[in-house]
Image: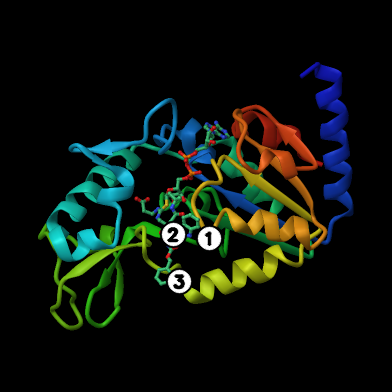
Amino acid sequence: MPVNREQTIAEGVRERLRAARGVFVLTGAGVSAESGVPTFRGGADTAVWKGLPFDVISSAGMIARDLPAVWEWFDYRRGVLSHCRPNPAHAALACWQDRFERFTLATQNVDGLHAAAGSRGVLELHGNVWRARCLACGCTEDIREMGGGERPPACRACGEWMRPDVVLFGEMLPVDVWAEAAGRAGGCDVCLVVGTSAIVYPAAGLPVAARRAGAYLVEVNPELTPLSEVCDATFRGPAGEVLPRLDF
Ligand code: BV8
């Protein structure tokens, strides 16, 4: 896209942000790509683990079928993440959080990088890879504070096995987190969608709901997505470069 045309659009978005009272942001794996976190559908194929497509190893049935394998998969993910730090996209969103009457950051990412960048009250739609949850009593614990590598780890409250506190395919999203995200998406002036292929539901429905409720919809993604055609503005570039440019 010719530079001045993108600059014009960027100035339009900055104006909208300056005037906005409520801003809703939905992020996906792409916002962490520049931190070195592999995306799921980056490039041609879907991420595969030991021959299993990620949406199989990350599916509800695996908990009953092979909980140790699920832990191995998320231990591997944590291993990758332990070398990753927030990037300028995370930083831009963190400094925007106090500049609006209502600012909501909802993410599909389980990497915890938004919080690491200073974002508060992030709505983690799909959970967090650094937390474990007891299969019996529902207690959650930060895995970094659980010491020993026992797998599956036992719950310190009731002794039952714990599972990664992430939402697997076929599982409901946390009801309170979802309700807040859906409510906020339906009441914002500007909705930004950053780094998501917008394929996984119900998260991908949030920007559509925001648009239907009258929000100005902005997409930041190097590639086209199913959402692109309903957006008011799109930026085909990496979030770590585009978001700082949208600072207003
Ligand atoms: C449920 C945690 C029901 C685990 C995840 C309606 C229609 C069709 C299917 C369904 C439907 N409703 C439900 C379904 C089924 C399913 C689903 O959506 N399937 C898809 C595959 C079609 N949904 C579910 O199962 C959900 N649960 O519906 O429960 C229910 C109801 C009642 C009772 C019981 C149950 C649960 C979904 C959550 C699953 N868990 N994650 C883990 O991480 O392993 S999903 C996981 O995959 C991520 O969290 C994320 O949501 C998704 C990956 O998508 P993205 O984040 O967008 O990443 P992707 O790689 O695809 O794309 C990256 C993008 O970034 C690209 O566009 C790329 O161009 C861009 N990019 C790259 N670099 C950059 C960049 N952008 C900006 N800057 C860059 N530098």
Question: Which one is in front, 3 or 225?
Answer: 225
Report x, y in % for residue 215. Answer: 80, 56
**Depicted 181 relative to depicted 230: above or below:** below
The answer to whether the residue bearing label 2 lies less than 8 angstroms from the nearest atom of ligand 1 is: yes
Q: CA distance from mark 2 to mark 1?
A: 11 Å
User: At x 66% / y 61%, what residue is drawn?
Assistant: 104
* Mark nearer the N terminus (1 vs 3): 3
Q: How is the image coloured?
A: rainbow
Which is closer to the viewer, label 2 or label 1? 1
The amino acid at mark 3 is Pro
Look at the image and tell me in which quarter the C terminus lies.
top right
User: At x 30% / y 53%, what residue is drawn?
Assistant: 58
Q: Which mark is residue 202?
A: 1
Question: Which one is in front, 122 or 177?
Answer: 177
Report x, y in % for residue 53. Answer: 28, 41
User: Residue under circle 2?
Assistant: 126
Quadrant hosting residue 187: bottom right
Q: CA distance from mark 1 to mark 3?
A: 12 Å
The amino acid at mark 2 is His
Look at the image and tell me in which quarter the N terminus lies.
top right
* Mark nearer the N terminus (2 vs 1): 2
The answer to whether the residue bearing label 1 lies less than 8 angstroms from the nearest atom of ligand 1 is: yes
Report x, y in % for residue 28. Answer: 52, 46
Q: Secondary structure at mark 1?
A: loop
Q: Looking at the image, how many numbered discs can be counted on the residues?
A: 3
**Depicted 107 relative to depicted 176: above or below:** above
Question: Which one is in front, 178 or 98?
Answer: 178
* Mark nearer the N terminus (3 vs 2): 2
User: Residue under circle 3?
Assistant: 174
